[in-house]
Amino acid sequence: MIAAVAIVLGSLFVTTYSLALGDPVPRSIDAALVGDPRGDAGTVKAVQGVAENSLDFTQYASLAAARDAIDHQRVYAALDLTSTRPTLYVASAAGASVARVLEKISTVDPSVRVVDTHPLASRDPSGLDIFYLMLVGTLVGFITVFQTRALAGGLPLRHWTGFVVAFALAASLALTLVEEPILDRLDIPVLEVWGILAMHILAVASFTSLMTVLIGPWAIVPTWLFFVVLGNSSSGGTVSPPLLPAPFEFVSQWLPSGATVTSLRDAIYFPGYEHARPILVLAAWAAALFGAMLVVSYRRGTSPGGS
């Protein structure tokens, strides 16, 4: 039975990652348009061509307004038809996979200039470090809960609660310091990133703890499905939401993993333009799961630590 469950979980992992991330296809990419498209229909058609007609253009009165929309991540790109040379503005930090798709215009129509307004760090040209931070936070979050329960079982609820909070703070600080300044990979705001990762790890550890109270030894099943199979594949860390299949795109920003990736991206690459929604989503998950762990454990007269 254990082997069968492991095989099923592994198969689901391969399936979701292959379907969601294996062949990214543009579906609906928000973009700004400055100028009259009728006066330069060829350029608009060429840009739409590389994006497989997925660009959802919104007219902006000026380039400054369109650039501001990119800064606030209301759009992924802006096409300026008013300059001497048509210019496509992208932001690889907002979505590296989207930027790579749009940058193909340089080959299709060399007359279009491409400008990256928010480039990725030189040491992270694929923009994966943020995804790795979230992924490692997820893994250490649930593995530590299972190992602590197995090797240091018998902790009463009060001690387990303190352990989960202390571990979330310590692990998130360690991951933050490894990324910067130890490895010097990204120029990150340490306190903000620490807080985001702490909420994510708290959510993971609390969910895992809650499952151990509810279903005991089989807690790995819902934890794996929720955070690894669904959460990581839809997080937007490797493939931007506009390139994900519709179900994954829909849930992307409403799950802890996706909210964590977006919050980290905002903090690192868009300082001063951070969005409240991903932080609030992540905080809500962390608080709700932590509270549920306490309530269920108290009502059942037990502890996730097995006491």
Image (tube, grey):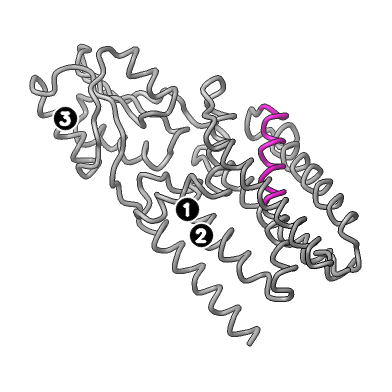
Reading the image, the residue beneath label 3 is 44
Q: Over which residues does the magenta segment extend?
A: 189-203
* Residue at the (45%, 51%) spot, across then down: 251
* Residue at the (22%, 12%) spot, across then down: 83
Q: Left of 19 or right of it: where is 174?
A: right
38 vs 140: above or below: above
Give 176 or 182, whichever is nearer the viewer: 176
Q: Amino acid at mark 3?
A: Val
Q: Left of 263 or right of it: where is 176?
A: right
- Real-space Cα separation, disc 3 to disc 2, in angstroms: 36 Å
Give 185 or 4, whichever is nearer the viewer: 4
Reading the image, the residue beneath label 1 is 234
- Real-space Cα separation, disc 3 to disc 1, in angstroms: 30 Å
Q: Is residue 103 magenta?
A: no
Label 3 Cα crowd, 10 Å radius (few <14 / some 14-19 / many 20+): some
Q: Quadrant of the N terminus?
A: bottom right
Pointer 1 with pointer 2, Cβ within 8 A: yes
Q: Amino acid at mark 2?
A: Leu
Element assignment for label 3: helix
Q: Quadrant of the C terminus?
A: bottom right
